[in-house]
Image: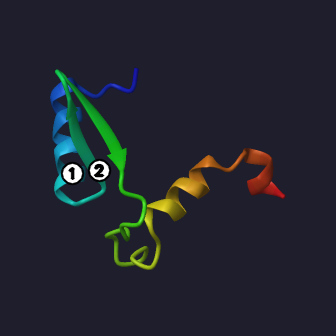
C-alpha cells in the first residue's frame, strides 16, 4: 500500500534497531517489535525531544491540533 518493498522494510527495522529506537524479540518463529520510547531523536533540531514526544504528537486527534 505504501510502495515499500519487504527488503526495504527489513533494512529500516534493522536501522531502527541499531539506533536503539526498536527492540526485536524472537517469539518462536515470529518477531515481536517494541518501540523504545525514552530514546532521544537524532536530528540536531529535535535532539531535545524523545520518541515519546513524537508518538504523542502523531497520536493527537486532528481537532486537538487545530484548536
Image quarter hosting the N terminus: top left
Residue toward you, 56 or 4: 56
Whole-number angstrom distance, CA of label 2 to CA of label 1? 5 Å
Residue toward you, 8 or 22: 22
The colour style of the image is: rainbow
46 to 34, vertically: above or below: below
Question: Which SS class for mark 2?
Answer: strand
For label 1, count other residues whose C-alpha is less than 10 Å away and answer few (under 14), some (14-19) or many (20+).
Answer: some
Left or right of 43, for residue 62: right
Residue depicted at 57% across the width and 50% down the height: 58
Disc sitting over residue 22 in the figure: 2
Q: Quadrant of residue 37?
A: bottom left
Disc sitting over residue 66 in the figure: none
Residue depicted at 39% across the width and 27% down the height: 2
13 to 26, vertically: above or below: below
Image position, residue 57 (x, y; %): 60, 57
* Residue labelled with disc 1: 17
Left or right of 53, for residue 60: right
Asked whether the residues under the numbered discs 2 and 1 touch, taking CB atoms below 8 Å apart as contact, a structural biologist would say: yes
Question: Which SS class for mark 1?
Answer: helix
Amino acid at each position: 500500500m505504501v510502495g515499500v518493498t519487504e527488503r526495504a522494510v527489513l533494512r529500516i527495522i534493522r536501522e531502527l534497531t541499531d539506533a536503539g529506537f526498536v527492540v526485536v524479540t524472537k517469539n518462536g518463529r515470529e518477531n515481536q517489535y517494541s518501540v523504545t520510547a525514552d530514546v532521544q531523536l537524532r536530528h540536531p533540531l529535535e535532539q531535545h525531544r524523545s520518541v515519546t514526544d513524537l508518538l504523542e504528537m502523531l497520536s493527537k486527534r486532528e481537532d486537538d491540533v487545530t484548536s
